[in-house]
Image: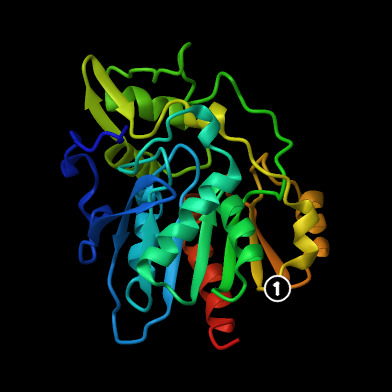
């Protein structure tokens, strides 16, 4: 099954200065690991530009990084994948298809299909967890990796009453208006700026009979079975930057220190006023940290 693609929220709902857009990326599809996967390509700003690949988190699509991607697209060749069950990519046939190994097998097939040789990899949450495994498996292809607010193994209980709570039977909760969805997100993510909530609604919600639903497989959250990557961390061969939100409950200060100690080529930064979505909550600081890290490793 494919995710819904129709949109119904107009750009007028956002402030004009928040809607300034770089050139629209090219949308395309490849079949990898048995699924039809959607991705976008912002193109190379110049011949030979270094490629940056973005992997979104759970409850998201490629567009979650949109503003950051547009910033980097001025200097880098930016690509972003809708991972299985999200956005316009195909859904696996069963909830069991949301394990780390399957996500990474998709990504391996996508990289091969596009003929990508070397690139920097940036991931958020679930996407960052997938990026860690891919980097361990393919150090010859990854220049460096930016890992946003996720540990090698998840020991944080999932909130059954969270902002994206599903209904029995794995169905989406239908929101009567986009504002109702935004209000639930405000409560769950109080550190996130209002522009980000509005932008997420525009990018993630699709209209259906009776209201609005997010554009991902409702079975994906409960189906996600993240692999324990702690045993692999000492074997990482490519530089990693762990970014932690100071107000996030996902990675604590001690856990971050443990991650750096376990991973020889790693460094870390904490964005103190940010929650889990650090690239929204402290956007400019996130861009600066990621930019400096990537630039420092381009020729290694």
Q: Residue at x 51, y 28 (%)?
A: 95
Q: Residues within 10 Å of mark 1 (few under 14, many from 20)?
A: many
How many labels sit on residues?
Answer: 1
Q: Position of residue 182 (x, y in %)?
A: 37, 30
Q: Quadrant of the N terminus?
A: top left
Residue 260 visible from this viewpoint: no
Q: Residue at x 62, y 50 (%)?
A: 149
Q: Position of residue 202 (x, y in %)?
A: 27, 40
**What residue sits right under mark 1 in the picture?**
237
Residue 104 visible from this viewpoint: yes
Q: Residue at x 42, y 74 (%)?
A: 51
Out of 56 and 181, give the one closest to the viewer: 56
Name the outermost residue toward the top: 168
Left or right: 205 as drawn, with respect to 240: left
Vertical placement of residue 183 versus 61, above or below: above
Out of 14 and 168, give the one closest to the viewer: 168
Q: Position of residue 297 (x, y in %)?
A: 58, 82
Name the outermost residue toward the front: 34
What secondary structure is marked by label 1?
loop
Left or right: 267 as drawn, with respect to 31: right
Q: Quadrant of the C terminus?
A: bottom right
Vertical placement of residue 256 versus 90, above or below: below
Vertical placement of residue 141 versus 46, above or below: above
Left or right: 15 as drawn, with respect to 194: left
Q: Position of residue 157 (x, y in %)?
A: 69, 29
Out of 9 and 226, give the one closest to the viewer: 226
Vertical placement of residue 160 versus 231, above or below: above
Q: How is the image coloured?
A: rainbow
Q: Examine the image and state in which quarter residue 227 appears.
A: top right
Left or right: 127 as drawn, with respect to 226: left
Q: Residue at x 78, y 52 (%)?
A: 230
């Amino acid at each position: 099954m494919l995710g819904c693609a129709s949109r119904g929220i107009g750009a007028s709902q956002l402030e004009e200065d928040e809607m300034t857009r770089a050139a629209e990326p090219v949308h395309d599809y490849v079949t990898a690991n048995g699924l039809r996967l959607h991705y976008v390509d912002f193109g190379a700003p110049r011949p030979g530009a270094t490629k940056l690949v973005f992997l979104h988190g759970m409850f998201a699509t490629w567009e979650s990084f949109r503003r950051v991607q547009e910033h980097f697209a001025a200097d880098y060749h930016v690509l972003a994948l809708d991972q299985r069950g999200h956005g316009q990519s195909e859904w696996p046939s069963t909830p069991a298809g949301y394990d780390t190994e399957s996500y990474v097998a998709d990504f391996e097939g996508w990289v091969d299909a596009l003929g990508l040789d070397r690139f920097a990899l940036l991931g958020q949450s679930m996407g960052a967890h997938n990026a860690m495994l891919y980097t361990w498996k393919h150090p010859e292809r990854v220049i460096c990796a930016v890992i946003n607010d996720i540990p090698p193994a998840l020991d944080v209980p999932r909130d059954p009453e969270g902002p994206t709570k599903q209904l029995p039977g794995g169905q989406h909760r239908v929101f009567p208006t986009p504002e109702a969805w935004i209000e639930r997100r405000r409560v769950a993510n109080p550190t996130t700026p209002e522009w980000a909530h509005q932008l997420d609604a525009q990018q993630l919600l699709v209209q259906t009979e009776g209201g609005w639903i997010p554009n991902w497989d409702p079975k994906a959250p409960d189906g996600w079975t993240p692999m324990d990557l702690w045993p692999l961390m000492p074997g990482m061969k490519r530089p990693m930057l762990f970014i932690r939100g100071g107000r996030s409950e996902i990675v604590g200060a001690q856990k971050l220190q443990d991650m750096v100690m376990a991973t020889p080529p790693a460094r870390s930064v904490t964005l103190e006023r940010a929650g889990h979505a650090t690239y929204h909550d402290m956007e400019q600081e996130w861009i600066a940290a990621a930019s400096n890290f990537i630039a420092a490793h381009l020729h290694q």
